[in-house]
Image (cartoon, rainbow, N blue to C red):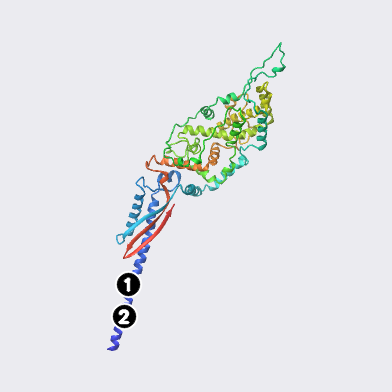
Amino acid sequence: MNNKGRIVVFISMITAVMLVLITLVIQVVILSAAKSKNVIATRLSMSDIKACYNSYIFEHYHILLFDKTVGGKGEAYLEEWLEQAYAEKLGAEYTDVRASITDMTMLTDQSYAPLKKQMQEYMVYAAAEKGVQMGVDQMKEKTGGQDGTLPEEVKEDMETAEVKTDGMDVDDTSDAGVVGSENMDEENPTVQPEVDDPRDYTKKLSGSIILNLVLPEDKTVSDATISLVDAPSLRLIGFFSDYKEVDRDFDSMVPLLEGLTALGSWQDSLTDTGIQLAYIGQVFNSYREEKNDTAVLAYEQEYLIAGKSSDYENLKSVAHRMIGIRYPINYIGLIRQPDKMQTLTELATSIAGAAPYLIPALKYFLAGCWAYIESIADVRILFDGKKAPFMKNADNWITDIEHISESLSKETEDAENGLDYQAYLSILQAMNIDGATARMLDLMQINTMQEEKEFRILHAAVGLEADFESTFGGHRFQYHQSAAY
């Protein structure tokens, strides 16, 4: 009996221990399952927020973002939504459920780093990265790595010419047309006919006239306008500066040099901007190509450069800036052509008349005038959808200084190794890529607001961090999660 009793006691103790162990194992399993469910619930809840991306932005710009105000309802609403999603995924057995957003990554953070990252990812995904690099390389190849930077020897010659006329009124050519009058026979005077000064032509040109000169006859300009009241770029005034058009009087050395140097140096700006420039060319409208038929502006790429509130003003500004890019390039090409410079010297001599001291400076003023006229002809080619030759020489020079109007309307062939309208847009964008990026956000906001009135790009988030808490079976769980596109 004693042995049997001992056995029963032993078995009971073993059984009790086993039951305790089994209970502990079950509790551990339950807690582990609860923990796993909690982790999954936090991740799924974060994914729910990410799933509410702005569909218009993604469809047209391939950028993933969500509105932290949920259409103007406020950030508190987003937090409540996150907490509700978390509670639903946990189930009723969890109590004291809480979720709080601790931080958000905005599209505009760190100088638009999230935006630039997604632009690059899209271009890679679209298998365009190789093409992007080739595009920049081709531009550099066609330009020979050159731009409109004036050679130092040219600047020195111009400054020397200015010194020779220092203190004299270079624009005073009242004696023009009376060439060699000091040697005339008083009994039989011969007054030569007045010499045509090409500067008289450029002085009459207004901004609107120049736009009409470069526009093809069969093209009309869009009359679309936008409001810039809430434009994100308005916060970045320091990024922008108004472009000062080339002075079309050509009677003073200082404005002449300013016009030649304003947009002369841009090759370095093409470095490390290839992805962004290609992205802009793929998703934004321009005068030459429509990319988004729901956009408010027809000339979006031009807006990235000029920042005006109407298509007309943006196109006009871009036309002047393209002329500004071509101007120093053509000036360099002109002064390297001895025959044309001889023509200008003779013309300067005729205009100077009895004031030969004006000739050195006048020659450069006339060269600037002719280079400017040639630049108008080049931009006219670009607006017509053709490529214009980059460096100019006697073979591809278009205009005639003695027949300006006729030569401006001359038909030209497409230059195989030249640059087209889009290339010059890219150059202008690259020269202020930060400003162009800021204005991208203006266009994204303005176009999205056509469907979602409360959308603001400054509320656009691309990531968030949150703390989660819940209680299960007397155990408190706490987690921190982060998620981003």
- Identified by mark 1, the residue type is Thr
Q: Is residue 13 left or right of residue 384?
A: left
Asked whether the residues under the numbered discs 1 and 2 touch, taking CB atoms below 8 Å apart as contact, a structural biologist would say no
Q: Compared to 80, does 344 lie above or below?
A: above
Q: Compared to 232, does 93 lie above or below?
A: below
Which residue is under mark 1? 23
Q: Which residue is drawn at the image coordinates 37% and 42% (left, top)? A: 454
Q: Nearer the viewer, residue 308 or 340?
A: 308
**Residue 41 image position (x, y, % from top left):** 36, 58
Residue 371 falls in image quadrant: top right
Q: Is any part of residue 283 visible from this angle?
A: no
How packed mark 2 is, by other alpha carbons closer than 10 Å (few <14, some 14-19, many 20 or more), is few
- Identified by mark 2, the residue type is Met
**Residue 413 image position (x, y, % from top left):** 59, 32
Which residue is under mark 2? 13
Q: Residue furthest top?
A: 187
**Residue 234 image position (x, y, % from top left):** 45, 40
Residue 195 falls in image quadrant: top right
Residue 227 falls in image quadrant: top left
Q: Compared to 28, does 238 lie above or below?
A: above
Q: Residue furthest left?
A: 1
